[in-house]
Image (cartoon, coloured by chain):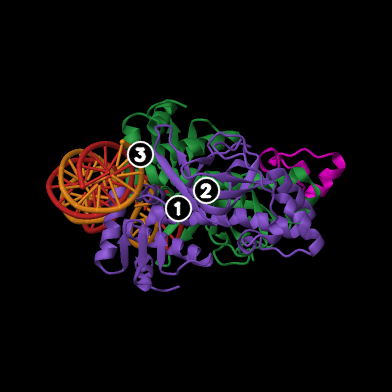
Chain colours: A green, B purple, C red, D orange
Amino acid sequence: MAIATTPETIKVACSSCNLRELCMPISFGADDMQRLDEVVATRHHVKQGELLFRDGEPFKSLFAIRTGFFKTSVSTPEGHEQVTGFQMAGEIIGLDGIVTDQHSCNAMALEDAEVCVMPFANVEELSREFPVLQRHVHKIMSREIVRENSMMLLIGNMRSEERLAAFLLNLVQRLHARGFSQSEIVLRMSREEIGSYLGMKLETVSRAFSKFSDEGIIEVKQRYVGILNAPALKKIVNPTGCV
Amino acid sequence: MAIATTPETIKVACSSCNLRELCMPISFGADDMQRLDEVVATRHHVKQGELLFRDGEPFKSLFAIRTGFFKTSVSTPEGHEQVTGFQMAGEIIGLDGIVTDQHSCNAMALEDAEVCVMPFANVEELSREFPVLQRHVHKIMSREIVRENSMMLLIGNMRSEERLAAFLLNLVQRLHARGFSQSEIVLRMSREEIGSYLGMKLETVSRAFSKFSDEGIIEVKQRYVGILNAPALKKIVNPTGCV
DNA sequence: AAGCTGTTTTGATGCATATCAAAAGATAAT
DNA sequence: ATTATCTTTTGATATGCATCAAAACAGCTT
């Protein structure tokens, strides 16, 4: 199953986890809270560059990211990679494996990471018992469907600069929800990985960064990105400004 | 909620539905089978061109397509439409609405259609009672996530002709699973809708059709498409032929 | 059958992004 | 420090697809 992970087995409780608001924002009684802790079997560390799971591997568990940063990707037979998402603390990965009991994408740690291993059998069992958990699981899956809908819109309809602007805004918004700066990002992924995610080439990504930088909208220094003019970025994504 | 549908309210049982193998391929005892029938509250007819649900509308139910053909789509504020999927008999739509209790896309009937209305509260209640149904619901959502992953790969990495070839093969495969021909399709959607789905313009879709036709791979007569050389189509999608 | 409307095809041209190439800059290893 | 390796930037050019335009075609209406 999970390959390239350290065999470490720390048992830690959801009930006392500081990420619970993001990961399991559901309210239980004190007694039930102990039951909720049963969803997480163990924790695993994944080192930068290692795979948490890979395409074709048997599916057993979902993973909640505690620390670190992941990318998920699929590939053509010829080896062209398409990054399908970037995931950070509090987010759940592995949902792709449910349908066939096999994972259908790769999940690589872009920085040293720690994940909570949630055997899917546990998730389903507790979901039957606790409607609020059941609802939460459904929402997580639905959210992923909606996110991918909007990615199809982005890749299918927007131009390169709009895509990059949308990407940066989405990233900073999610980081801000985790207590990071509203205006500063340290990218965990390469230009090539951004390009793969957004359906463009790394050179095009680089050029778009340079253009935004020239226009004073952002400040770029390697993987550091400072957002100097967020409204301008938003206007690039949505020129009309309505909504 | 569901707009532009006839208020018809026919109560029909899943247990005796000829689409059950596609829609609810789960085996129950005779007694439990009656309970399963409770997922479907009513049926609705939707006329060609009408919306089953629209972006922003409150989410109450999932819909199982009994007959007919749908497209789902999202839009930019400026009004650019991105078709996110085409759905046919036996498939489930509405999953996008779960996360926010509001639909986030539009679902339009591309031909007169009939759907089974499955109030999501029923689905969740019965899922708690029947693990096999619970698992099925999870699989349906996971399948949608995996499908959208592969759409991102398609739109982000393939060229126009590869996209159209992949589209035709996918369509014919799904139709064949429903008892239709392996080599003939009557398209329910316009060139523009195909283009929107595949991230290309209607003219480009048309040119790709013409090219395939010139090469003798397919036969095109308006919305009728005959597949004359399926291996050639497959080779366009996957030139190396491995896998 | 004739006229109208919307869809599809085909052609000519333009543009955004890919591709090719090389330099500059960062990171890691010796 | 020095060299090697990988990433990023920038430039020159090519190309696939979009755009613009118009004709051909099918489906309706009268």
Quadrant where the N terminus of chain B lies? top right
Looking at the rendered structure, the secondary structure element under dot 1 is: helix
Kind of residue sitting beneath label 3: Glu
Q: Residues within 10 Å of mark 2 (few under 14, many from 20)?
A: many
The tally of labels here is 3
Q: Position of residue A141 (x, y in %)?
A: 62, 48
Q: Earlier in the sequence, mark 2 or mark 3?
A: 2
What's drawn in magenta, residue-wise?
A10-38
What's under tag 1, amino acid-wise? Met
Q: Chain of mark 1?
A: B
Q: Nearer the viewer, residue B141 or B152?
A: B141
Q: Which residue is mark 1?
A: B152
Q: Disc 2 and disc 3: Cα gap in Å? A: 19 Å
Q: Is residue A10 visible?
A: no
Rate crowding at label 1 as few (under 14), some (14 to 19) or many (20 or more) other CA atoms within 10 Å: many
The residue tagged 2 is: A86
Residue located farthest toward the right when viewing the structure as drawn? A31
Which is in the foreground here, disc 1 or disc 3?
1
Disc 1 and disc 3: Cα gap in Å? 18 Å
Q: Residue A167 lies in what quarter of the image?
A: top left
Q: Residue at x 87, y 43 (%)?
A: A31
Please state the chain letter of the residue tagged with numbered disc 2 in the rendered image. A
Choose between A166 and A114: the one closer to the eye. Answer: A166
Quarter of the image with the C terminus of chain B in it = bottom left
- Label 2: which secondary element: strand
Neighbour tally class for label 3: few under 14, some 14-19, many 20 plus, Cα within 10 Å: some
Q: In the drawing, does residue B165 fall left or right of residue D24?
A: right
Q: Is residue A22 magenta?
A: yes
How far from the left and from the top, in percent, is residue A67?
A: 62, 47
Can residue B198 be spotted in the picture? yes
Q: Nearer the viewer, residue A38 or C4?
A: C4
Question: Mark 3 highlights which residue?
Answer: A161
